[in-house]
Amino acid sequence: MSADGLQKIFKTLADPTRMRILALLEREELAVQELMDVLGMAQSRVSRHLGILRETGLLRDRREGTYVFYRFAPPPPGPWREAWDLARRALEGDPAAERDAAALVRVVEARASRIRSFFDSVGPEWDALRRVFNDEALRARAIAHLAPPELVVCDVGTGTGILARELAQLGLRVVAVDNAPRRLAVARAALEKDGITGVELRGGEAQTLPLADAEVDAAFAHMVLHYVPQPGEAIREMARVVKPGGRVVVVDFVRHEAEWMREELGVLWLGFPSDEIVAWLRAAGLGDIRIEHVASPSPGRDLPATFIASARK
Ligand SMILES: C[S@@+](CC[C@H](N)C(=O)[O-])C[C@H]1O[C@@H](n2cnc3c(N)ncnc32)[C@H](O)[C@@H]1O
């Protein structure tokens, strides 16, 4: 190493404040204000030392908005590394360095306590605040990452394509089937209008799905089965089109007495008892059957409860 180079090392480390700063930043990334708090020094002084240290390459800075954070950048093996090792050893037992270490613990704890007291103080308002960040949509997208990429799902009786669109927006590929051409036209127009790709619409019957065996990873039928003459056949078809290991999910009404639905909604079935659904899922060769009951959203209005049944091929 040249004499100039050596002199630069000595000059840099000759100042005790610079050594203390390096020792602190070796332990923790700190903002200028935090360094000022720990060292009990004014900004001008701290910034001047930081400038000198940055020039030597012993520091890295990270800008975040109006904040700049500094941390120690360990020098590669060589004279700088040896000099710093020596300087660090010299700091051991140094009263100022010990005071710094204690103050550092307080500053770091104050950071954590600022976050804790923020969440303690927002309390219930947090749920309103999170909406500003469109938190629900974000969570749904995040949950979709649990599914393997390129998952292909069949949406049986897609109607206007609400479920298909949601799945596609989460990055899944969807084959959406319905036997009503006008419903498919509405679904197509809505998907095109919003530029949603990833949904393939197919006209066809739930009881004879227009899909090859094992074409998809999962099959959904959301509020469709009560329109299908032979629901057990539709479930058998859903089982046929999913790959081994894939899931079949059926959402529908539990058995109910809301006769008005026949007249007004044209339903064929007044919901289904759980044991019948389980029997159909079993008969289709599916296992790992789970059924969840969901209470009616407005029980006073003669609206039946629903179930979510799922099973694995
Ligand atoms: C109550 S809508 C549900 C639509 C959609 N799944 C949803 O949750 O928004 C029932 C849909 O099933 C379709 N559908 C009824 N019987 C069907 C069958 N046998 N095969 C295919 N689709 C059928 C209807 O055309 C309608 O679009």
Image (tube, rainbow, N blue to C red):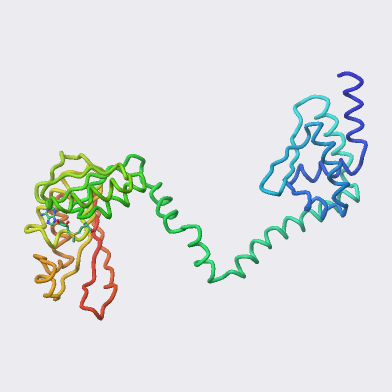
Q: Farthest residue in the left direction? A: 229
* Position of residue 142 in the picture relative to residue 64 (left or right): left
- Nearest to the observer: residue 84 or residue 154: 154
Name the residue: 50% across, 57% down: 133
Quarter location, residue 62 = top right
The total of numbered circles placed on residues is 0
Residue 185 pos. (x, y %): 18, 49
Q: Quadrant of ligand 1?
A: bottom left
Name the residue: 91% across, 22% down: 4
* Position of residue 138 in the picture relative to residue 208 (left or right): right
Of the 4 image quadrants, the one containing the N terminus is top right
Residue 256 pos. (x, y %): 16, 73
Q: Farthest residue in the bottom direction? A: 300
Q: Is residue 2 above or below residue 306?
A: above
Residue 45 pos. (x, y %): 88, 46
* Position of residue 47 in the picture relative to residue 211 (left or right): right
* Position of residue 15 in the picture relative to residue 145 (left or right): right
Name the residue: 20% across, 39% down: 215
Residue 253 pos. (x, y %): 19, 67
Q: Is residue 30 above or below residue 257?
A: above
